[in-house]
Amino acid sequence: MKIRRRDFLKMTSGAALSCGWQRLARAADAPTVYDLERFGNARILHLTDTHAQLLPVYFREPSVNIGIGEMQGRPPHLVGRAFLDHFGIRPDSADAYAFTSIDFEKSAGRFGKLGGFAHLKTLIDHLRNDVGHERSLLVDGGDMWQGTGLANTMQGADMVEAANLLGVEAMTGHWEFTYGEKTLRANLERFKGEFLAQNVYLTEEAAFNDAKALDPASGRVFEPYSIKEIGGYRVAVIGQAFPYVPIAHPKRFTPDWKFGIRDGELQKLTDGLRNTDKVDAVVLLSHNGMDVDLKLAGRITGIDVILGGHTHDAVPQSVPVTNAGGTTLVTNAGSNGKFLGVLDLELAKGKVSDLRYRLLPVFSELLKPDAAMVALIDKVRGAQAAAWSGKIATSDHLLYRRGNFSGPVDQLICDALRSELNAEIALSPGFRWGSTVLAGQTLTMEDVLAETAITYPETYVQGMTGSQIKDVLEDVCDNLFNADPYYQQGGDMVRVGGLSYTCTPAENIGRRISELKLANGRPLEAGKRYKVAGWASVNEQTGAAVWDVVARHLQSGKPPNRQTSGVTLKGVDDNPGIAGQG
């Protein structure tokens, strides 16, 4: 597929790219469409939540990303036309395709896939060479090692190689922890950059038993920060790992470690960097999620910019937050390798005098793939990719995941769980990773794994009462819509199969979920037990891996479920975070 010239003439300079297609004539050897106006004396490039997508992907941004209370109508809780209007992006443009779900299938045919590590390598090298490597830095916000069958099989080792070739100099983590401490440390031994996490400490028991730690006295497990010399100035990069690892994932993966936001420790660390180390800038490399970062920015002084991840929010411009010490800029750089954040700083002694931030969509067809990265990808994919390339089925409609309440990918998973495990109801976690499949595209095991590849994929079937099912929905919904961002963990709503319900996001916990009904229209009875299937339990299970269950369902030839998600929303009619159910 070739991108038509007239399509990219509509690219909007305000939100992302700063020059037009007419400059692409030299693009055979250099990505001149990505030439940026020179600014400042230091450049930091930020990549996050790639989820091991080595190759270019389609990824549909959400049409439902609801903000409640103070967050209503504010980034990142804008979708569709409201998003375009807020950021000054022209409809029917390449940026509109990259940042929203508007006319996604039509635009996918015009603008193609985004991301891909070989294309990222070309773009990163171009942007670093433009200012000089001594004046630039590449950081990764985590969730690089997980998200594909290959990464799951190799336990992230393939992504360590890719990160090294990409030139990542500092990273923090989230799903990286789900490989367990032994594998994590082995991967970090091979990683050429630094792993930073100020908020990971030994548990009391682990400290008593002299478990391995960076600083046994404090119990801190990893380096909390790194001071980088950039263009003769000192820039501190603090790492903030996902705060809820032992809650969101099985505790058995990190039994010796405790996490948390730990903003008190973060403030002490920042004060020391400012007052003792006399750094010129402080950057927080965060995997908190954007709402958490926005609250954090209002509480902590001394941080210039938060380079955020976890919630997969692609926000073109930084959001300023005022605190007692001044202003902190908060960013979030999307997912799946679709975007690259560019932070240009004008550094002076002891301060950032000015800065400029852009989030660049990585249009793979505008970037010549880097030959060395192509060779590495071919090597690590090897025979495994060939083994997963056989046709399982053909998608007869668009399959995507991202959205607060549902997506066709998760409806497919729920259908498979109910059908193959003979269950009345299915529950599937609200993960935000996973690629998008266009209608008419062949589905392979590699595609199935891109939606399901985790280290605890076992399915289960268990009896649950109607009241227990409602409690689960209420609990997850509170995680999504709690008015205090510190009580949010960043995923989307648990997906359901064989069940419909009404959700009122602005209500309090216990009152958001109502009108629960089975697929046959009968009300869910509080005291009655139902057969429920699921996967990705934090408790150990022994059932078949979910990818095998889904593949078996697809191969069965059963007609696809054309029903909608079955979720009715109340109280959000004028909310700019909703452009349609999905």
Image (cartoon, rainbow, N blue to C red):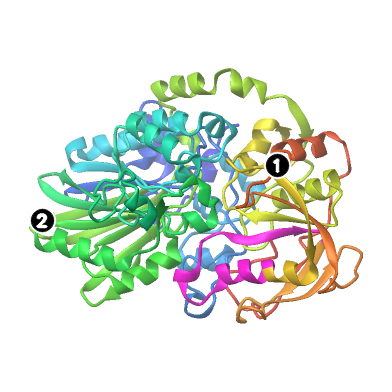
Between discs 2 and 1, the one toward the N terminus: 2
Q: Which residue is pictured at 22% across the width and 73% down the height? A: 326
Query: Where's the N terminus, which quadrant?
Result: top right
Q: Position of residue 491 (x, y in %)?
A: 56, 59
Query: Where's the C terminus, which quadrant?
Result: bottom right
Q: Circle 1 sits on which residue? A: 542
Q: Nearer the viewer, residue 484 or 135?
A: 484
Q: Give, as a three-letter code, the residue at label 1.
A: Thr
In the rendered structure, the answer to whether residue 550 lies left or right of residue 26 reads right
Residue 30 can be seen, yes or no: no
User: In what element is the residue under mark 1?
Assistant: loop
Q: Which mark is residue 277?
A: 2
Does the CB distance between marks 2 and 1 fall below 8 Å?
no
Give, as a single range, the part of the protein colored magenta: 472-498
Specify whether residue 482 is painted magenta.
yes
In the rendered structure, the answer to whether residue 386 lies left or right of residue 3 reads right
Q: Which mark is residue 13?
A: none
Q: Nearer the viewer, residue 127 or 93?
A: 127
Q: Position of residue 241 (x, y in %)?
A: 38, 53
Q: Position of residue 112 (x, y in %)?
A: 57, 39
Which of the two discs, 2 and 1, sits closer to the camera? 1
Location of residue 541 with respect to 479 vertically, above or below: above
In the rendered structure, the answer to whether residue 517 lies left or right of residue 156 reads right
> In this view, which residue lies farthest toward the front?
209
- Numbered circles on residues, count: 2
Alpha carbons under labels 2 and 1: distance apart: 51 Å
Q: Give, as a three-letter code, the residue at label 2.
A: Asp
Q: Position of residue 205 (x, y in %)?
A: 38, 54
Q: Nearer the viewer, residue 338 or 322?
A: 322
Specify whether residue 262 is painted magenta.
no
